[in-house]
Image (cartoon, rainbow, N blue to C red):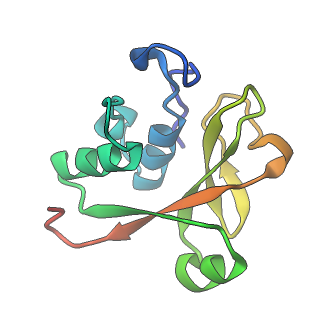
Amino acid sequence: MINQTRFGGPTALIRERGNCFAACLASILDCELDVVDAPDEKGKHWLDIFHQRLVDVGLPYRLLMLKPTAHILKTWVRDALYIASGPSPRGDYLHSCVYKKGELVHDPFPGGSGFKNQQVNDIVVLIWIGSNAN
């Protein structure tokens, strides 16, 4: 599993903002962090930025954000790894971790143990779309 390499919160300079989501994505895809790490772009939604990064490097996946209901986890996600987001225990901002079946698998923050109060707000699942990601 891959650890994040930047740790700044949302008020940090763009190049210093945390890359926990990218570390989770790299962990699930079993690739190096720099393959999927994508810089923030003003005016673009972060999920669109990561989707474009996957397209740019030839990884045919879509990213789908969902609420982590029991039905969604049991019916749609099943045994797959997914990215969960929730409140960071280190500040007033969101953090991302790898989950499976509602359980923490990997916190990309070195020595991290998940979310504040173990609260998961949203999940992002990777959807395989075949050999053409466009």
Residue 32, x across and y down, in percent: 36, 37
User: In the rendering, at what x and y percent does residue 74 appear?
Assistant: 65, 83
Most extreme residue toward the front is 43
At a point 55% along the width and 25% down the height, the residue shown is 10
On the image, the x and y values in percent for residue 7 come to: 57, 21
77 vs 121: above or below = below
Residue 13 vertical placement versus 35 (above, below):
above
Residue at horizontal 55%, vertical 18%? 11
In x, y percent, where is residue 26?
42, 45
Q: Residue at x 53, y 30 (%)?
A: 4
Where is the C terminus found, in terms of image quarters?
A: bottom left
Does residue 57 appear to the left or right of 125 in the view shown? left
Q: For the N terminus, give its image quadrant.
A: top right
Where, by quadrant of the figure, is residue 75 drawn?
bottom right
Residue 34, located in which quarter of the rendered image?
Answer: top left
Write the residue at 51% across / 21% down.
6
Numbered disc total: 0
